[in-house]
Amino acid sequence: MSQHDDPTREAPPATQQQPLPRRATITDVAREAGTGKTSISRYLNGEMSVLSPELRARIEAAIARLDYQPNQMARGLKRGRNRLIGMLLADLTNPYTVEVLQGVEAACHALGLMPLICHAANEVEMERRYLQLLTTYRVEGVIVNALGVREETLRPVGGGGIPAVLVDRSVDGLVADMVGLDNRAAADLGTRHLLEQRFEDIWFVVQPFEQVSSRQLRELAFRDAMRAQSAARGHTLVLNLADAADVGRGLAQLDRAIDAANATNAANTANTTSAANAVPADNPGNSTALPRIALFAANAPVALRLALHLKARYGADWQARVALLSIDDPDWAELAGITTIRQPTYDIGYRAVEFLHERIEGVQSIARDCLLPGELIVRASTLR
Amino acid sequence: MSQHDDPTREAPPATQQQPLPRRATITDVAREAGTGKTSISRYLNGEMSVLSPELRARIEAAIARLDYQPNQMARGLKRGRNRLIGMLLADLTNPYTVEVLQGVEAACHALGLMPLICHAANEVEMERRYLQLLTTYRVEGVIVNALGVREETLRPVGGGGIPAVLVDRSVDGLVADMVGLDNRAAADLGTRHLLEQRFEDIWFVVQPFEQVSSRQLRELAFRDAMRAQSAARGHTLVLNLADAADVGRGLAQLDRAIDAANATNAANTANTTSAANAVPADNPGNSTALPRIALFAANAPVALRLALHLKARYGADWQARVALLSIDDPDWAELAGITTIRQPTYDIGYRAVEFLHERIEGVQSIARDCLLPGELIVRASTLR
DNA sequence: CTGTTAGCGCTTTCAG
DNA sequence: CTGAAAGCGCTAACAG
């Protein structure tokens, strides 16, 4: 808990070459300008109307001469507000996260906030620790892309504690604003597209979703959309990307389904005996050997894992065997030619900050949800 | 410059439902424990040896009861050290950056530092502003993945100002520690590989590099490696990814080269008239129609741009026309099957923090360079 | 319009 | 071993 005492509390004064130009303080400026600290402070805070042009000029000069920059820490200490907000990220490795971050940064910039970015790297323990750290720095609010947090962890935040807004997913038992994708609509959109393309076997592949509301919603919407008709079969496969063995099992299951689908496919189309060497077919304007089985990845990390496996198993031409559709639109999607549902990531981030800002400014209202629509981007992969 | 005065300085006291549980201060704890602030402070700083077990217990209890957490801002103000370091990132969109960040975070965590992450998003102006902001928060040091900064911008940093360490690239005229890829070795490694594979035409494609030392070094090493032999022709193509027109011109030039190479290739191999419909060829154990021209991308963003274009122009089978090798190993490289030179990104980040930490602790030495080796990962793309 | 005076929450002499 | 007191750099009454 308590910090270890560090041996080098001060740099060895003997070796101290450069006089270490101690930053000028408000007192220095006051002296330099021949006035009191108050006036400097007023200048700093833009209370120009209350300063004589003459004094103001002197202050300006003194500040420039000393290259003075107010110490935010000190300001924050006094004011009780430091313009810092925390941004807790579950996984920066996910392009989604980075994109959201861009929106967050833009909004912070516009609102004069400074985001403290914390990356939990998929470790619940990290998440807890960072949250603690953030409160220690007295951030005025937090934006949380929660990992495995249950409500306890976030207790100090939200409700009674500091304002919080959730991104992408909600946390059980925690009441707070939330902004993210309209998951139901997005999953429905994707499923419908697949159905329209007449895929007969559709697998929704998703990471464990007990903890993650967005995944739950997507899976649920998928099942609902499938149930609404009878032309195709729907399945859900849970893939725990952090567990190699589990991934192995899941992929094997998928392989069997794919092989089966292609076997019947081949039978129907006649010829082409086993599952080997179907000519890739640039052949335009037909739909004979095209896959009747489609994979619907709940997000980009899943999609990537699937694509890598399929490529390894079926070679470069894997898309002749299976179609792939994914929520999230990572940069390689275009290259791989897979269909995606792009999230309005930038807006999500921007909106989250706006919500938080309002809360910080004292807005009291019930928790709000902001659900933004996804956009279907059809690529070759799912076209029959 | 000066902040606008915000209307809502305090939340309307009338609506203030919850008593807004003001965080406990050291004074509260002292009172609660029936002792002085000094002892609390001592406890906080781990000076246990100087506290009677009895008092210590009382303090522990009081802290727990009040859920007290020391205010880092206040500590920092007094001590002159706040354990904050700045991390200035040119482009989070580049997977390289995110990977480096992971190393940085790990190291910070290990050293009890808190990184303030700032994302310049490729805007020089942002970079300047963030640097300013960071000094305003009195960070103890900065790690800079510089964008377009020239020395002036970084003046307050490095040399006389706060400690800085550069990542990936150096900045003209700024003396500071630097850690990054061994660019010369990496580019040499890649070029040699291409030469060994008997490519006859090799294009090094790179973003404008006047400002960016790492790009310069890579390009230089490429040319050197090419000059050392005569079997193949080497070219450098500069692609300004931020300028669509420029990209268009560059890609067109590349297209011509590729078509030309494939024309002679076809001629030599006999048959296959124009540049159309060469059968993809899963055909094992031969090397007839394989490309004799290779593209060497200076980094992942360039590689992606190239791959996207090639796919658009030549279809899914573009790799039969051109080989692609890239410095950086983004996650889609495996999927696309392109050869890469992976940077030890995590180590780069980790090392950077270690360097910075030493400087913060007062280590005085000449600026150090830490060049880490890249690793060649050969994939189908460059195999003939 | 301007300066003086108290602190914000914490650390650190310096005396008990 | 323990505590009182003086500030870190800044803001905010409160008087001129």
Image (spheres, coloured by chain):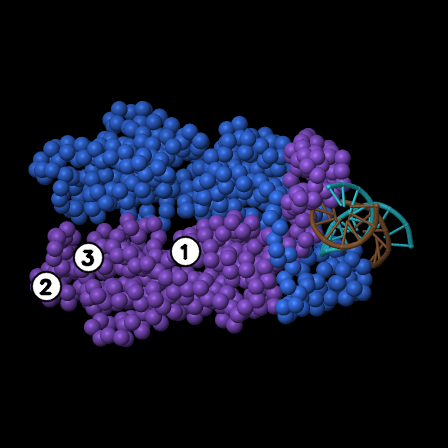
Chain colours: A purple, B blue, C cyan, D brown
Distance between mark 3 and mark 2 Cα atoms = 14 Å
- Which of the two residues, A40 or A296, is positioned nearer the viewer here? A40
* Chain for disc number 3: A
Distance between mark 3 and mark 1 Cα atoms = 31 Å
In the depicted structure, whether residue A93 falls above or below residue A61? below
**Residue drawn where x is 27% and y is 72% of the image:** A226
Residue B97: quadrant of the picture = top left
**Which residue is denoted by mark 1 in the rendering?**
A345
* Chain for disc number 2: A
- How far from the left and from the top, in percent, is residue A191? 28, 66
Amino acid type of the residue tagged 3 in the rendering: Ala
**Which residue is denoted by mark 3 in the rendering?**
A320
Q: Could one spot residue A250 in this view of the protein?
A: no
- Which of the two residues, B181 or A295, is positioned nearer the viewer here? A295
- At label 2, counting other C-alpha atoms closer than 10 Å, the crowd grade (few under 14, some 14-19, many 20 or more) is few
In the depicted structure, whether residue A382 falls above or below residue B170? below
Residue B35: quadrant of the picture = bottom right
Distance between mark 1 and mark 2 Cα atoms = 42 Å
Q: Are marks 3 and 2 in contact (CB under 8 Å)?
A: no
Callouts 1 and 2 on one subunit: yes
- How far from the left and from the top, in percent, is residue B192? 32, 32
- Which of the two residues, A270 or B76, is positioned nearer the viewer here? B76
| Disc 1 element | helix
**Residue drawn where x is 66% and y is 65% of the image:** B13
Labels 1 and 2: the sequence-earlier one: 2
Q: Nearer the viewer, mark 3 or mark 1?
A: 1
Labels 3 and 2: the sequence-earlier one: 2
**Which residue is denoted by mark 2 in the rendering?**
A269
Amino acid type of the residue tagged 2 in the rendering: Thr
